[in-house]
Image (cartoon, rainbow, N blue to C red):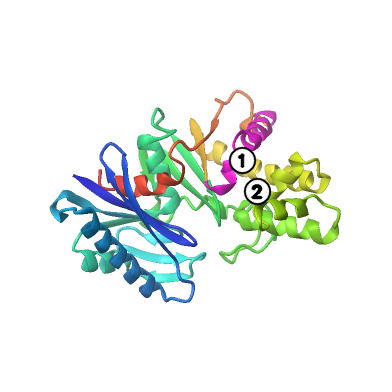
């Protein structure tokens, strides 16, 4: 018996058969067509799942169900994506559509919740009971495990940690609020800061990173800083400040044993994590005498979301 875990991202959807031991089978994927309606995208996903089951030779009676990690806010009991600001999905009855299209039971949760569940059961958090996962990519998401259980909040709409305001009346976030952590610490926010610095400083080594990577992306400020660029250094220092303050807020509210960092920006690894640890230690996690919170990388990487989504059936 196994489940199919589906990780819906901002630009693509990936899924795989996941065993009860957390082993990942062959992966299928499809790009998200920005010109397609939300319903058309789900019908494409249904076709991909059905083709995957047929190609792998699976029997439906061996499949516990299909778990989906959704970027955005969902009513997990009703099975409806209430709103996904990055995908512009609204009131999408995703569970009913996939169940009718595949003949299999379906469960959903927020994508960062799925990643948190995967890391808690099979990854970096498996030795702990109180875990926070922070996923940094197109947005900033999070998943919270309290006393070994996934916390979703009322109607599954809690744990939206990327939309904590860190600057009152600050930068406009994709959710419509001003000053959210996501507006300062997501990959697009980093790229925006880099573009602003490049416009003001044509001598910046940020231009060299564009030649190296073929485009301006979230790796740029870290790479340019390693090259000795002062403008990139300022961007990274500011980034650490905002992300560090966000983490300190989470520490003081939830007091987790560990924070698991996932997503594209987290690929900077120790180059970033060491600074975040130092930032939090200098501020005593808010007050003296509190237990240290470990800041560690994901062990499951990009599989965390798929594994966690499937784990909704384990």
Q: Secondary structure at mark 1?
A: helix
Image location (x, y in percent) of residue 28: 35, 56
* Quadrant in the picture for residue 12: bottom left
Instruction: Quickly name the residue at label 2.
Output: 219
Q: Main secondary structure of the magenta part?
A: helix
Is the residue 84 above or below the residue 117 in the image? below
Residue drawn at x 50%, y 32% is 258
Number of other residues with Cα within 10 Å of mark 1, as a class: few under 14, some 14 to 19, many 20 or more? some
252 left or right of 151 in image: right
Foreground residue among 197 and 182:
197
**Residues at circles 2 and 1 in contact by the CB criterion of under 8 Å:** yes
Q: Is residue 176 magenta?
A: no
For the residues labelled 2 and 1, the Cα–Cα distance comes to: 8 Å
Q: Magenta span covers which residues?
A: 263-282
Quadrant that contains the C terminus: top left
Instruction: Quickly name the residue at label 1.
Output: 268
């Amino acid at each position: 018996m196994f489940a199919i875990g589906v990780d819906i991202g901002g630009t693509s959807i990936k899924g795989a058969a996941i065993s009860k031991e957390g082993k990942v089978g062959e992966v299928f994927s499809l790009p998200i067509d920005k010109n397609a309606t939300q319903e058309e995208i789900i019908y494409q996903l249904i076709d991909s799942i059905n083709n995957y089951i047929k190609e792998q030779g699976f029997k439906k009676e061996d499949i516990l169900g299909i778990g989906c990690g959704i970027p955005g806010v969902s009513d997990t009991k009703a099975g409806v994506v209430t709103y996904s600001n990055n995908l512009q999905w609204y009131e999408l009855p995703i569970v009913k559509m996939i169940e009718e299209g595949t003949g299999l039971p379906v469960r959903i949760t927020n994508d960062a919740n799925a990643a948190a569940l995967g890391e808690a059961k099979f990854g970096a958090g498996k030795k702990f009971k109180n875990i926070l996962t922070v996923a940094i990519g197109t947005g900033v998401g999070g998943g919270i495990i309290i006393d070994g259980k996934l916390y979703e909040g009322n109607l599954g709409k809690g744990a939206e940690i990327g939309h904590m305001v860190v600057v009152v009346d600050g930068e406009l976030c994709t959710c419509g609020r001003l000053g959210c952590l996501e507006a300062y610490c997501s990959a697009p926010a980093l790229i925006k800061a880099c573009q602003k610095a490049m416009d003001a400083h044509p001598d910046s080594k940020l231009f060299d990173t564009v030649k190296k990577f073929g485009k301006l992306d979230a790796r740029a400020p870290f790479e340019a800083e390693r090259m000795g660029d002062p403008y990139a250094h300022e961007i990274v220092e500011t980034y650490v400040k905002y992300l560090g303050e966000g983490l300190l807020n989470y520490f003081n509210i939830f007091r987790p044993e560990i924070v698991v960092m996932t997503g594209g920006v987290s690929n900077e690894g120790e180059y970033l994590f060491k600074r975040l640890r130092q930032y939090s230690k200098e501020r005593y996690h808010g007050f003296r005498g509190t237990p240290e919170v470990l800041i560690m990388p994901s062990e499951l990487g990009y599989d965390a979301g798929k594994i966690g989504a499937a784990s909704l059936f384990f």
